[in-house]
Image (cartoon, rainbow, N blue to C red):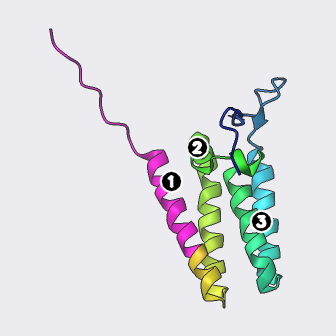
Amino acid sequence: METDKSMPRPVLRRPDDDNDGLVALPPVPLVRQRLRSSVKDFAISQPGRRAAALAAVWIAATGCEADLAHYDPEEALRTYRLIESELRAELRISLGRAITNEPHAATRNTMISMLEHLEELEAAAVAPRPARRRRRR
């Protein structure tokens, strides 16, 4: 099966950039509501449903509204404003609790790797850029 490389990837936009037909990152309160309800569902769901709940939490926290086949979660995390970083902190705390309560090793390992990856992305998102060198003439 061959993928069409010419197909454009959706651009992640802010809700203020409307009327252009592009994908918007949802407002912070909506993401927080999705994250909290997903975590509640996760806590009471059967093991087979936990993977789907975990995916819902991840998508809600990273602001995905686009087709997952073309979605770049790393880019979404980098484009989030600083005030929204508390959502990632909330996701980290929620994942930590879920890891503690997860009886299945494979699911627990997946959650641990997602948490580690989230921390790497956060570090990359807030890392200072190296100073540009000016050439003297």
* Range of residues picked out in magenta: 111-137
Magenta-drawn stretch contains 94: no
Question: Which residue is at a point 59% across and 61% down the rendered structure image?
Answer: 89
Q: Nearer the viewer, residue 131 or 72?
A: 72
Q: CA distance from mark 3 to mark 1?
A: 20 Å
Q: Is residue 112 left or right of residue 37?
A: left
Hey, which quadrant is residue 115 in on the image? bottom right
Q: Are marks 3 and 1 in contact (CB under 8 Å)?
A: no
Q: CA distance from mark 1 to mark 2?
A: 11 Å
Q: Amino acid at mark 2?
A: Glu
Residue identifier under label 2: 75
Residue identifier under label 3: 36
Q: Please state which of the two labelled residues, at mark 2 or mark 3, is closer to the viewer.
A: 2
Magenta-drawn stretch contains 124: yes
Residue identifier under label 1: 122
Question: Which residue is at a point 69% across and 36% down the rendered structure image?
Answer: 9
Q: Amino acid at mark 3?
A: Arg
Q: Are marks 1 and 2 in contact (CB under 8 Å)?
A: no
Q: Is residue 86 above or below residue 10?
A: below
Q: Earlier in the sequence, mark 3 or mark 1?
A: 3
Q: Earlier in the sequence, mark 2 or mark 3?
A: 3
Question: Which residue is at a point 72% across and 70% down the rendered structure image?
Answer: 54
The local crowd at label 2, few if under 14, some if 14 to 19, many if 20 or more residues have their Cα within 10 Å, is some
Q: Label 1's element?
A: helix
Instruction: Give coordinates of residue 1: x percent, y percent.
Output: 71, 52
Question: Which residue is at a point 73% across and 47% down the rendered structure image?
Answer: 28
Q: Label 3's element?
A: helix
